[in-house]
């Protein structure tokens, strides 16, 4: 099998809520580094991970450095593909009112299919 | 019956693998990762590097003392590094957060089998390897 | 085109396996390792399509006295898991 010449795509699958665990920030750090090296990087949010996108949060109220503010830099880093699991939103009674633009809500099959278009997947 | 054919080692010659470790040395999950890595090395997979992130950085702490009747995780990393020249990359930002740094009056806390690295190395490993597996 | 899913947690304890099931495609493979071996008797296993092959690491089920007879799982070795890593198109670890 010959090695593909096109750059590999990375998917970061976010499964944890922000703040209480470092998983979200740890995933974000990886995303930004890969993007800064011009590696195609896509963000996925599933399960409690969808909480990272909700409008109006403020980690500073609980003495957490609010890494969510960095999400507004995604466009600058050319991170343009951001996908959220619809079922996870519904299960949590959440609307699609996100604190960033460019987020696409996908149903189960769409989310699964989109994830499967990536070469490398890291889950946090 | 397993659906896959038993592999011919020729099929996996030149197969490059990178591994990310996120679990600490006292976790059985890390032992599983080590067994996976050892299996790969024994069948001549080229492991381009192991990247230690999150709690995985604790594997680089030279001061870790594992009870002598338990699996010697740190010694196993060292042995693999020495026997196979397996690169062990430590994410320095994560390491410092866990209190492991190379700047210390009494010398480095980082076991010398580990290379001080950053997330840029993970990009390099990921680009270089055909598969990146997370543990 | 298929994905190898390495499932390392028990569905009786966490929802990692549930989330895995949500992204399964027909030709995918699941290998249960570590506490993921307990998932063979979790009710969510019924949601996994017949076409998805289920495997467990021999030592991991034996250590936990889990009997796979009567389940849809096949026992494999760690060498097999390494081979599967390269026989599938991508791998996702659920832990």
Image (cartoon, coloured by chain):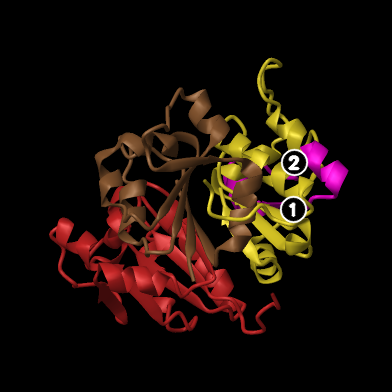
Position of residue B33 measured from the top left corner of the image (x, y, whole percent): 62, 42
Q: Does the magenta portion include B99?
A: yes
Q: Residue shown at 74%/41% (left/top)? A: B110
* Neighbourhood count class around disc 1 (C-alpha, 10 Å): few under 14, some 14–19, many 20 upward: some
Q: Residue shown at 49%/36% (left/top)? A: C34
Residue C39 occupies quadrant? top left
Which subunit holds the residue at mark 2? Answer: B
Q: Residue shown at 67%/58% (left/top)? A: B18
Say what secondary structure mark 2 lies in: loop
- Most foreground residue, C19 or C68: C68
The tint of chain A in the picture is: red
Q: Is residue C49 above or below residue A20?
A: below
Residue C13 occupies quadrant? top left
Labels 2 and 1 positioned on one and the same chain: yes
Q: Which residue is mark 2?
A: B110
Position of residue B62 measured from the top left corner of the image (x, y, whole percent): 74, 33
| Dot 2 or dot 1, earlier in sequence | 2
Which subunit holds the residue at mark 1? Answer: B
Q: Does the magenta portion include B75?
A: no
The tint of chain B in the picture is: yellow
Q: Is residue B124 above or below residue B19?
A: below
Q: Is residue C31 toward the left or the right of residue B25 in the image?
A: left
Circles 2 and 1: CB distance less than 8 Å?
yes
Position of residue A88 measured from the top left corner of the image (x, y, whole percent): 23, 60
Q: Residue furthest toward the left?
A: A93
Q: Residue furthest toward the front?
A: B1
Q: Which residues are magenta?
A: B78-103
Can residue A79 be seen here? The reply is: yes
Q: Which residue is mark 1?
A: B116
Q: Is residue A21 toward the left or the right of residue C81 in the image?
A: left
Figure chain in brown: C
Position of residue B82 measured from the top left corner of the image (x, y, whole percent): 86, 42
């Amino acid at each position: 099998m010959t090695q593909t010449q096109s750059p590999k795509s990375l998917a970061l699958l976010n499964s944890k809520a922000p703040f209480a665990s470092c998983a979200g920030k740890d995933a974000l750090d990886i995303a930004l580094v890969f993007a800064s090296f011009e590696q195609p990087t896509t963000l996925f949010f599933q399960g409690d991970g969808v909480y990272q996108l909700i409008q109006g949060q403020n980690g500073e109220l609980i003495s957490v450095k609010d890494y969510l503010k960095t999400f507004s830099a995604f466009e600058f880093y050319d991170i343009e593909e951001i996908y959220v699991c619809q079922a996870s939103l519904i299960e949590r009674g959440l609307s699609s009112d996100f604190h960033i633009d460019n987020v696409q809500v996908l149903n189960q099959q769409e989310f699964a299919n989109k994830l499967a278009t990536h070469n490398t997947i890291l889950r946090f | 019956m397993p659906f896959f054919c038993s592999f011919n080692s020729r099929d996996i010659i030149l197969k490059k693998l990178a591994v990310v470790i996120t679990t600490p040395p006292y976790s059985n999950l890390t032992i599983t990762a080590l067994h996976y890595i050892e299996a790969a090395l024994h069948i001549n997979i080229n492991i381009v590097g192991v990247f230690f992130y999150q709690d995985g950085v604790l594997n680089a702490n030279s001061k870790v003392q594992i009870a002598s009747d338990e699996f010697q995780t740190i010694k196993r990393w060292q042995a693999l590094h020495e026997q196979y020249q397996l690169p062990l990359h430590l994410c320095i930002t994560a390491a410092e957060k866990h209190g492991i740094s190379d700047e210390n009056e009494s010398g480095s806390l980082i076991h010398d089998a580990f290379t001080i690295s950053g997330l840029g190395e993970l990009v390099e490993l990921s680009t270089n390897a055909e598969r990146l597996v997370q543990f | 085109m298929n994905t190898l899913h390495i499932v390392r947690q028990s569905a009786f304890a966490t929802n990692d396996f549930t989330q895995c099931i949500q992204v399964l495609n027909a030709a995918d493979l699941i290998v249960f390792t570590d506490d993921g071996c307990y998932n063979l008797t979790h009710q969510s296993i019924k949601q996994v399509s017949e076409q998805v092959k289920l495997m467990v690491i021999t030592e991991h089920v034996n250590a936990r006295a889990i009997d796979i007879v009567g389940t849809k799982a096949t026992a494999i070795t760690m060498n097999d898991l390494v081979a599967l890593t390269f026989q599938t198109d991508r791998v996702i670890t659920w832990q």
